[in-house]
């Protein structure tokens, strides 16, 4: 049997000199290509879990394995984030001065994709998320939903095996939220990537292969 | 793409940083061009005499204060290898003394009528060279600035001298000066038969060093200098260089602080964006390179502008400054200007760039 896409072993994260425990020993396996939805109240540790799995942060103890490799022994976490993980943030985090195409090119710049190739890929991805008419619009001129779709295209730029979405519909109305989730699912189907979505919203969990609840730093 | 857009984001701040660098580099170019121009024109003036050796009094801080007695002049003439010796005297008279308050000063060269040293002024002269003790000639620039013409008179050292010629010279301070009979200066300054300096013309094939050795052995009070090395001998002229570099350094430090301030602010403002770049896989090195390049781009644009403004400023400076100053531009000076600009951009941006590269992606993303 193949390795799970993500395996966490007794993952603990404490802040402020151990005064705050964000994760209190999380062990979970997430199969390749699956859609996992993590639900729970604010401050329960959902985003901390996502950050550790996405190599944005390091655990106080415990281990994260991505595609069978331990992040603890990984020397270049930047490369892991660039090549294996695609992030979709709640506030999209686009570079405001850049156009949609340029924002999607950013992760490809990290791995040295030649200019012409990354431009073609960015245009293709933006077309896939329905933004072919907004290719050269500066991020600040886009609507909230459009920004989030650019953010999805950016997450897919280096064809990652894992897509992590932190409250991806938290900043838009429900109709736009549906469109965004449809966009994410469409991308997942096309690429076969594993998807982990953190949300408050029960509607988003519809269609998930697995739903887990986070409470006080523990997954149930 | 990202770098240029980042710089354009706060246009006014970027422009001010560019201006800071430009002013620093302009100061370097302008002051150096004038300083080097002055020294170079002095050497050119000495070489244009046609003499190989210049003899001055070793104890004189500047050629103006040098005196060579009649006995020393006679002894110099007797040294083998010397084909001809021309005495020369030099002084600077304030414009107020000349009753011409608009003039800062007038350079006055004392020459013997009919001597070889005065011959060069004959080329392209309007009028003629002086022949009598109450005649003088003036340079074309001096004539223009003082509105003098042939036939006018000028009072110098209590003597009224008639202007009989207006000469041309490609050495600025010579063109802005005047030439009078040596005796006028000797009497006016009560020098007796002493002169300020002696120009030695050597016989063909004579090594100037051999002559120098003989002069300095016989007359230790005198120094024999190769005419082209005049400014090297008078090393107090190096103070010009020091002054130039100190003024330049101050301007440059101000420019460098401007880059540092701009880049620190830009890193602070863009903390979340830097977090995003790190989150999508940019390495610390890539962030460092981006901020450094922004600093270098600012400084190179500023440096380029500074070179032009400096050259233009130097010309304005010598136009308004006392007459006789000249400018000298070399490729090396421009290269030094650009290299300093580059270094300013690099080092000004280094600390902010290191700060940016050390940001933890997760902390940067949370930054408000």
Image: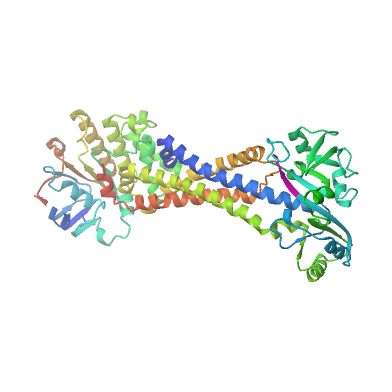
Give the x, y percent position of residue B106: 73, 42
Q: Is residue A181 above or below residue B233?
A: above
Pick the front one: B62 or B45: B62
Q: How did the renderer colour the structure?
A: rainbow
Total numbered labels: 0
Q: Main structural element of the magenta stretch: helix, strand or loop?
A: strand
For residue B259, what is the image quadrant?
A: top left
Relative to B63, A15 lies left or right: left
Mark yes or no: residue A26 visible.
yes
Please provide percent x and percent y for residue B40: 71, 51
Vertical comparison of B236 with B250: above or below: below
State the quadrant of the N terminus of chain B: top left
| Residue A2 appears in view | no
The quadrant of the rendering that contains the C terminus of chain B is: top left
What's the magenta region?
Answer: B91-95
In terms of depth relative to the viewer, which is nearer, B18 or B238?
B238
Query: Residue drawn at (76%, 69%), measured in percent from left and top?
Result: B220
Residue B191 is situated, as x and y percent measured from the top left of the image, at: 79, 54
Q: Nearer the viewer, residue B206 or B152?
A: B152
Magenta highlight on residue B171? no
Residue at image coords 75%, 66%: B221
Q: Is residue B316 left or right of residue B365?
A: right
- Quadrant of residue A125 in the image? top left
Left/right of residue A143 with respect to residue B250 in the rendered view: left
Point out residue B214 in the picture as x, y percentages from the top left corner.
Answer: 82, 70
B93 falls in the magenta region: yes
């Amino acid at each position: 049997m193949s390795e799970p896409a993500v395996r966490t072993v007794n993952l603990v994260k404490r802040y402020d000199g151990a005064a705050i425990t964000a994760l209190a020993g999380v062990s979970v396996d997430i199969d390749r290509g699956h859609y996992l939805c993590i639900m729970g109240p604010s401050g329960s540790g959902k985003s901390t879990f996502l950050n550790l799995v996405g190599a944005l942060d390091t655990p106080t103890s415990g281990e994260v394995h991505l595609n069978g490799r331990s992040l603890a022994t990984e020397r270049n976490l930047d490369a892991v984030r660039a090549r294996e993980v695609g992030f979709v943030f709640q506030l999209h985090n686009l570079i405001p001065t850049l156009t949609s195409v340029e924002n999607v090119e950013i992760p490809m710049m990290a791995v040295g994709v030649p200019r012409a190739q990354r431009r073609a890929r960015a245009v293709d991805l933006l077309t896939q998320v329905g933004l072919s008419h907004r290719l050269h619009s500066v991020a600040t001129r886009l609507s909230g939903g459009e920004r989030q779709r650019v953010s999805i295209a950016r997450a897919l730029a280096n064809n990652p095996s894992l897509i992590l979405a932190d409250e991806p519909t938290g900043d838009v109305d429900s109709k736009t939220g549906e469109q965004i989730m449809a966009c994410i699912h469409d991308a997942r189907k096309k690429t076969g990537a594993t998807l982990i979505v953190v949300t408050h919203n029960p509607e988003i969990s519809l269609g998930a292969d697995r739903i887990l609840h986070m409470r006080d730093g523990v997954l149930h | 793409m990202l770098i240029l857009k980042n710089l354009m984001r706060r246009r006014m701040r970027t422009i001010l940083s560019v201006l800071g660098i430009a002013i620093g580099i302009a100061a370097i170019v302008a002051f150096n061009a004038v300083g080097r121009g002055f020294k170079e024109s002095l050497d050119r003036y000495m070489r244009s005499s046609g003499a190989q050796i210049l003899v001055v009094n070793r104890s004189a801080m500047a050629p103006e204060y040098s005196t060579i007695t009649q006995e020393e002049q006679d002894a110099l003439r007797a040294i083998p290898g010397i084909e001809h010796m021309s005495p020369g005297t030099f002084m600077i008279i304030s414009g107020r003394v000349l009753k011409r308050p608009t003039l800062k000063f007038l350079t006055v060269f004392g020459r013997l009528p009919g001597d070889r040293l005065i011959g060069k002024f004959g080329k392209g002269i309007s009028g003629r060279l002086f022949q009598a003790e109450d005649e003088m000639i003036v340079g074309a620039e001096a004539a223009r600035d003082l509105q003098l013409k042939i036939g006018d008179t000028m009072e110098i050292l209590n003597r009224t001298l008639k202007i009989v010629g207006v000469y041309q010279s490609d050495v600025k301070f010579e063109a802005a000066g005047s030439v009078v009979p040596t005796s006028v200066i000797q009497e006016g300054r009560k020098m007796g038969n002493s002169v300020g300096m002696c120009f030695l013309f050597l016989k063909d094939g004579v090594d100037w060093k051999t002559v120098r050795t003989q002069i300095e052995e016989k007359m230790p009070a005198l120094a024999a200098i190769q005419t082209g090395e005049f400014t090297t001998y008078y090393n107090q002229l190096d103070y010009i260089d020091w002054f130039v570099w100190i003024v330049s350094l101050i301007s440059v430090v101000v420019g460098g602080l401007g880059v540092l301030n701009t880049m620190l602010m830009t890193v602070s403002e863009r903390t979340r964006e830097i977090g995003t770049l790190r989150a999508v896989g940019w390495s610390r090195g890539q962030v460092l390179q981006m901020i450094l390049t922004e600093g270098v781009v600012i400084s190179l644009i500023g440096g380029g502008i500074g070179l032009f403004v400096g050259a233009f400023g130097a010309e304005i400076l010598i136009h308004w400054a006392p007459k006789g100053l000249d400018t000298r531009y070399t490729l090396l000076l421009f290269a030094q200007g650009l290299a300093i600009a580059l270094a300013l951009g690099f080092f000004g941006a280094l600390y902010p760039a290191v700060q940016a590269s050390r940001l933890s992606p997760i902390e940067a993303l949370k930054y408000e």
